[in-house]
Image (cartoon, rainbow, N blue to C red):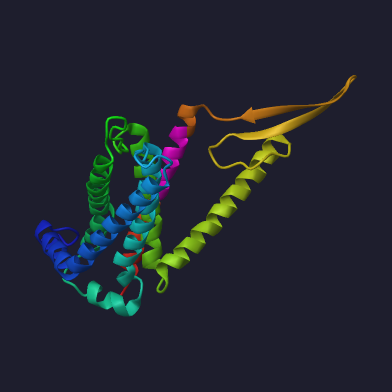
């Protein structure tokens, strides 16, 4: 029998995870449905015209915000038992490999969460929108599978999941809060370092510069008619910028997932 992955053993472990936590998962689904319904109703009421549809941009923002918050909290919670030594004993002593234990929780917190969350969002949004339809206002739905939308949703959640997963295993207590603080600190350092590097390259004081985003600086020159100022904008070509950004996200995501699995393998009973 394969000591790393066995489909029968993995299936039994998946069933065990489902049987032990299905009530919590069902309650979470109900809470998500209620939250989406409440926000959809709120935005509908806030529209100037009581019969106006909630537009696609609002739906997209709502989809992203709820997904990121609920997804990271769920990921942190499902892996939290692996963070503390006492809680981890029950999991580490199960007759299954570390890889199988990791993959069960990864499957629930990543693939299944994305599928179920998407189904919940549309299951609530479609009836709300349909009730507001009339001759002047046709149904408008956020299209997740439009290429641009899908890229933003998929990349954002993938990176957030990988970071939260690693934090849940590394930290023993208050996993979610500590992970957020660490990521905020890293974000500030990256933005500050990127601005310093860009200023060193162009030899000018520049405005805020986020990695892979254009930056601006002003060149002051003196002429016979007085001082003049010329603004310059430097940016990568859109395709090049997207390519490097996607590659960087993919590399960091794989590194975070690999680090989380490696950290799990190091845990001992």
Measured along the vertical axis of the image, is residue 133 above or below residue 41? above
Q: Which of 43 and 125 is in front in this view?
A: 43
Q: Which image quadrant is residue 50 in?
A: top left
Residue sitting at x 42%, y 49%: 252
In magenta segment, residue 248 = yes
User: As drawn, is 188 to the left or to the right of 53?
Assistant: right
Q: Residue 144, position in %: x, y?
A: 30, 39
Residue sitting at x 30%, y 72%: 81
Q: Which of 17 and 248 is in front in this view?
A: 17
| Quarter of the image with the N terminus in it | bottom left
In magenta segment, residue 232 = no
Q: Which image quadrant is residue 14 in?
A: bottom left
Q: Which image quadrant is residue 170 in?
A: bottom left
Residue sitting at x 42%, y 72%: 174
| Quarter of the image with the C terminus in it | bottom left
User: As drawn, is 75 to the left or to the right of 11?
Assistant: right
Measured along the vertical axis of the image, is residue 211 above or below residue 263? above
Q: Which residues are the magenta region?
A: 242-254
Residue lying farthest to the right in this orientation:
224
Measured along the vertical axis of the image, is residue 269 above or below residue 266? below
Q: Residue 86, position in %: x, y?
A: 31, 80
Measured along the vertical axis of the image, is residue 99 above or below residue 159? below
Q: Can residue 259 be seen in this view?
A: no
Q: Can residue 121 be seen in this view?
A: yes
Residue lying farthest to the bottom in this orientation:
86
């Amino acid at each position: 029998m394969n000591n790393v992955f066995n489909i029968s053993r993995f299936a039994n472990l998946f069933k065990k995870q489902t049987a032990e936590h299905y009530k919590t998962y069902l309650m979470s689904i109900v809470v998500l449905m209620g939250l989406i319904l409440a926000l959809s109703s709120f935005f509908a009421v806030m529209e100037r015209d009581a019969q106006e549809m909630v537009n696609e941009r609002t739906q997209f923002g709502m989809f992203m915000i709820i997904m990121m918050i609920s997804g990271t909290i769920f990921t942190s919670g499902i892996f939290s038992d692996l963070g503390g030594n006492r809680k981890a004993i029950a999991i580490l002593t199960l007759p299954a490999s570390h890889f199988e234990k990791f993959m069960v929780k990864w499957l629930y917190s990543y693939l299944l969460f994305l599928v179920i969350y998407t189904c919940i969002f549309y299951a609530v949004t479609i009836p709300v929108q349909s009730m507001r339809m009339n001759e002047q206002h046709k149904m408008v739905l956020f299209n997740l599978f439009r290429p641009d939308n899908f890229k933003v949703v998929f990349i954002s959640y993938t990176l957030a999941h990988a970071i939260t997963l690693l934090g849940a295993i590394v930290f023993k207590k208050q996993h979610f809060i500590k992970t957020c603080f660490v990521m905020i600190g890293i974000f500030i350092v990256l933005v500050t370092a990127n601005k310093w590097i860009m200023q060193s390259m162009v030899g000018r004081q520049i405005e805020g510069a986020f990695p892979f985003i254009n930056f601006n600086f002003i060149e002051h020159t003196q002429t016979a008619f007085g001082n003049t100022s010329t603004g310059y904008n430097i940016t990568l070509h859109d395709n090049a910028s997207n390519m490097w950004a996607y590659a960087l996200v993919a590399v960091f995501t794989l590194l975070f997932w690999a680090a989380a699995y490696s950290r799990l393998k190091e845990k001992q009973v």
